[in-house]
Image (cartoon, coloured by chain):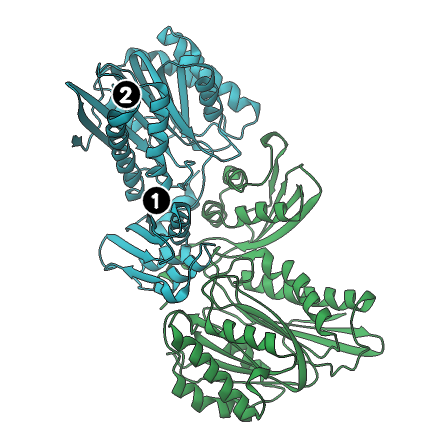
Chain colours: A cyan, B green
Amino acid sequence: VKIFKKAILPLGFQASALAGGIKKNGKLDLALLHSQVSARAAAQFTVNKIQAASVVVSKSHLKKNKIFRAIIVNSGNANCFCGKNSLADAERTVQYVAGALKTEKEKVLVASTGIIGRRLPMEKIKKAIPHLVTGLSRAGISEAKKAILTTDTFTKEITLKLNLGQKTVTICGIAKGSGMIAPNLATMLAFILTDARISRQALKKALGTSIEHSFNVITIDGCMSTNDAVFLLANGMAKNAPITSGKNFLIFQHALQIVCLELAKLLVRDAEGASKFIQIKVSGAKNFPQAKQAALAVANSNLFKTAIYGENPNFGRIAAALGASGVRLKEESLKIKVSSLQKKDIYVDVALHQGKAACTVYTSDLTCEYIKINAEYN
Amino acid sequence: VKIFKKAILPLGFQASALAGGIKKNGKLDLALLHSQVSARAAAQFTVNKIQAASVVVSKSHLKKNKIFRAIIVNSGNANCFCGKNSLADAERTVQYVAGALKTEKEKVLVASTGIIGRRLPMEKIKKAIPHLVTGLSRAGISEAKKAILTTDTFTKEITLKLNLGQKTVTICGIAKGSGMIAPNLATMLAFILTDARISRQALKKALGTSIEHSFNVITIDGCMSTNDAVFLLANGMAKNAPITSGKNFLIFQHALQIVCLELAKLLVRDAEGASKFIQIKVSGAKNFPQAKQAALAVANSNLFKTAIYGENPNFGRIAAALGASGVRLKEESLKIKVSSLQKKDIYVDVALHQGKAACTVYTSDLTCEYIKINAEYN
């Protein structure tokens, strides 16, 4: 297994990006990811009951259809909570892309991120899409990974190469997100592309397991977004023996989880206004859900997050958050350890002594910068 | 019914306060509330599984005993999460008070607030208590209401006088709290004194109903404390016909609820670093718990709170918080109204159109001041 801290497209994929005028500041705001051959897909979406039109349309295409060619992404506008217009605009976007690519609209997936409650500028998007299609190239990923960003301060990208039999399989992931990040997806956008040959069922299972231990164990502000999604496309161009179950599945799933966890950690490292990267491990829980619930209760406590920001060793706030979490614990057997608060990376270790399950959650501190960014964002 | 925005002790009550050296800055940190005759009591405590020793001791006394004479309160130290020492120190505190008052220790209740995880300075407390007892007076409430404060910037107090038959009943409440405020009590300290004659059962019921619609519908930072409590003492000195049920009960309960709600709102007005007082009304819910859950989901959303701070009309964040709340709703029937954000008092009205239940919740915005206060508090 080789890991590269940059996006390198797997075989058969292309990408492009441009500034279509959705963002007022003239930055890149449209990205197209494209597979030259049909790809299988798996995806997970926000569990928020208010769902962006991009989520509704992508879900519907994933239900109707088994092969896909492209994902169109816009940043700067969530295309959400505009009544029926949101849905019509998302439908039109995939139609324009399908038209330009000469494929069916059900083979196109869509993602949006940005402000909620504003109409998409459809004339601008219609005009931009043919240029996105003609601009597709292998090198285009270097722009596409920028075009999906909003308040992010850096790109999130990783590539992993592994050998399966005689073949090299590549998994490449890019992501965006730095606020409105909470578990149960509802988190951010991530696009993972692989040339692995893998059954649809195995793809879905590998993604589900990987997300549970990566994007679902990070939280920045406990706020669950309406838009966010993890997409995984697999086009089989690596020509490996098909992955269905057994050892090859486990190798692939493990590799995918590394990609997901690295992207998830990068999201936390870029948390809005954050000055610290915090890892909270809860062990000795009765079961995994209890361990996760306890760790997230600490991670989402504003008082804990501000104490870390202030480099203030206030263990009481950790105990109070655990006590309020609803998880089984006893004060007399609870052990809490915190690493030096003067460093950027903080490790919190909680031992509940109630069982054998453990979970590690990643979060950031809560700072004045976060307040400023979110007071002014519009 | 007459309402006074200051604490006026009901018949038969006295109070005192002094600076015992628990707070490093020499401010008042010990308060004693005393009834010259036996009083009935009702109380509610935090539901945090880590409970301060004061909560454990007061609960035990309320279980064992039916009449009470005093409440001893210290600020500056929560006396929590110090292992067995916490409990021993709380026991010793009530013993000292009982000794000085020449009463039994089970007739003394205790409350603590401040930093978690530090030992109480028991020598200082032992030395201070006789002075607290000799200092008891009717005027002492004006100092006692200050001695219970921590990060508060003003005292919280209210007095209500109502006529029951030929008699005037007085209900006086004081409270502290400005952070670590979330519903289900776990919230703050409040002490309510009344000279009403009322059965123990009616007292408990009146307090329960009043709290549900006051202290349990406020949230500042969603953080549940280990210490907090609402105490209600009734000493019968008003000599009204005993309140048990029926019309007099409803009148008393309603008056008590006014006192509780006013104190609860004062807590929110003094929220750490807050620049706005926000009232969120959710109507058209299936039932009251759903209405409350939806309103609290908005109230506890950091993104909503920072948007209000920034006077940034970001309705999408309200919709996203409602969608993530777990409450039944449909996007197409959801209506959201927000009053002018340039004012200090903000009104958010949400109509779910799923039923007839409503709940109003009170909260504050999230500001850089909150971060600074909590980053440095220690």
Identify the residue shown where x is 34% and y is 23%.
A202
Counting other residues with Cα less than 10 Å from the Cα at mark 2, is it few (<14), some (14-19), or many (20 or more)? many
**Residue B191 drawn at (x, y percent):** 59, 73
Which class describes the residues within 10 Å of circle 1: few (<14), some (14-19), or many (20+)? many
Task: Give the percent coordinates (x, y) of residue B98.
Answer: 54, 88
Local secondary structure at mark 1: loop
Residue B284 percent location from the top left of the image = 68, 41
Q: Name the foreground residue: A248 vs A334.
A: A248
Residue designated by label 1: A272
Locate the C terminus of chain B by quadrant: bottom left
Question: As drawn, is B211 to the left or to the right of B245?
Answer: left
Kindly identify the residue that appears in the image at 22 percent across and 21 percent down: A9
Expressed as whole percent of the image width and height from the top left, the position of residue A305 reads: 36, 55
Circle 2 marks a residue in which chain? A
Relative height, residue B210 to residue A371 (above, below)? below
Residue type, numbered disc 1: Glu
Res A354 seen here: yes
Is A3 situated above or below B349? above
B114 or A368, which is in the foreground? B114
| Distance of label 2 from label 1 (alpha carbons) | 39 Å
Image disc number at residue A243: 2
Residue found at x 40% / y 80%: B22
Amino acid type of the residue that numbered disc 2 sits on in the rendered structure: Ile
